[in-house]
Image: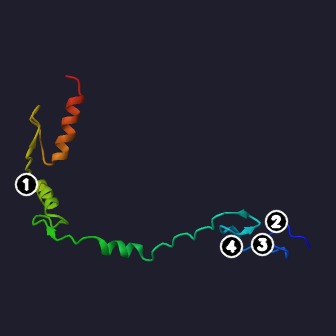
Amino acid sequence: MPVDPEAGSATGRKRSREEEDFDGEEGTSGRHGVGKIPRKEPEKRKKNSKQAQMRTKPPRVHECTTCGQACVTPSALTKHLRVHSGDKPYSCDTCGKAFAQSGTLTRHVRTQKEAPQ
C-alpha cells in the first residue's frame, strides 16, 4: 500500500508529535523534509509562582512611627515621613514653589522651560 504524505502513516492514523519531531530532526530524511529543527517543548510554568514571588521580596523593616506604614529602604521611609511633616526641601529657582521629592521638582522645571512666558 503506498504511503500518502498527507495521511500521516500507512494505517491512516494521525502521526504523534514525537513522530513529527523525529522526522524533522536535522540530518534525517522524513516526509517533512531534510534539515528541519525539531519543535521545542513549551517551558513549564513554575508551580506556586505567587508563593515563590512572595519569598523573594525583601522584608519591610523600616516602619513609620506615625501611621505604621512599612518600607523596604530607609530612603523610602524618609520620603514617606515628609507626608506627615510637610517638609518640602526641593524648591524651584524660577518661581519658588517647593516640593517634597526631587523628581517632582525636576518635572516642574521641565514644564517651566516648555511654557511660553
Q: CA distance from mark 2 to mark 3?
A: 11 Å
Q: Secondary structure at mark 2?
A: loop
Q: Residue at x 84, y 73 (%)?
A: 12
Q: CA distance from mark 1 to mark 3?
A: 73 Å
Specify which label sits upstream in the sequence, 4 or 3.
3
Q: Residue at x 62, y 67 (%)?
A: 39
Residue that lies at the very extreme toward the right in this rendered image: 1
Corner quadrant of residue 65 = bottom left
Specify which label sits upstream in the sequence, 1 or 2.
2
Specify which label sits upstream in the sequence, 1 or 3.
3
Residue matched to label 3: 14
Residue 89 x %, y %: 7, 47
- In this rendering, the answer to whether 21 lies above or below 98 is below
Q: Residues within 10 Å of mark 1 (few under 14, many from 20)?
A: few
At label 3, the amino acid type is Lys
Residue matched to label 4: 22
Q: CA distance from mark 1 to mark 4?
A: 70 Å
Residue matched to label 1: 85
Q: Secondary structure at mark 1?
A: helix
